[in-house]
Image (tube, grey):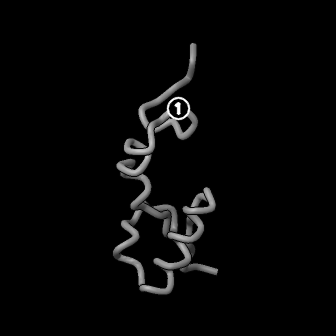
Amino acid sequence: MLKLHLYDSEFSTEKLAKSNPRNRLVVVDGMFVPIDMLPEEYQVIARQAQKEGATVSFSTRE
């Protein structure tokens, strides 16, 4: 099969890509958390990484 899904970055329109709910989430210690719940400095880091196409995750443990 084609292995396409609704928010496939290769085939989605710009409008659909912007409305992707995963764009507002990051992973903190293995749990999905809305970016807005992070401290401001981490929000900046997360949004910059997303613009570059990176997957964003943070860990509070060493």
32 up-or-down from 6: above or below: below
Name the residue at 38% across, 44% down.
15
Residue named by callout 1: 11
**Residue at screen point 35% across, 49% down:** 19
Name the spot of residue 61 as percent of width and height, x first.
Answer: 58, 79
Determine the image quadrant of residue 25: bottom left
Quadrant in the picture for residue 16: top left
Measuring from the top left, give residue 47's x and y in whole percent. Answer: 50, 70
- For residue 4, above or below residue 16: above
Relative to 1, residue 9 above or below: below
> Amino acid type of disc 1?
Phe
Q: Depth check: 57 or 61 in front? A: 57
Tell me the residue at 42%/32% (across/down).
6
Q: Is residue 33 left or right of residue 44?
A: left
User: Which quadrant of the figure contains the N terminus?
Assistant: top right
Res. 60 image quadrant: bottom right
Foreground: 15 or 60?
15
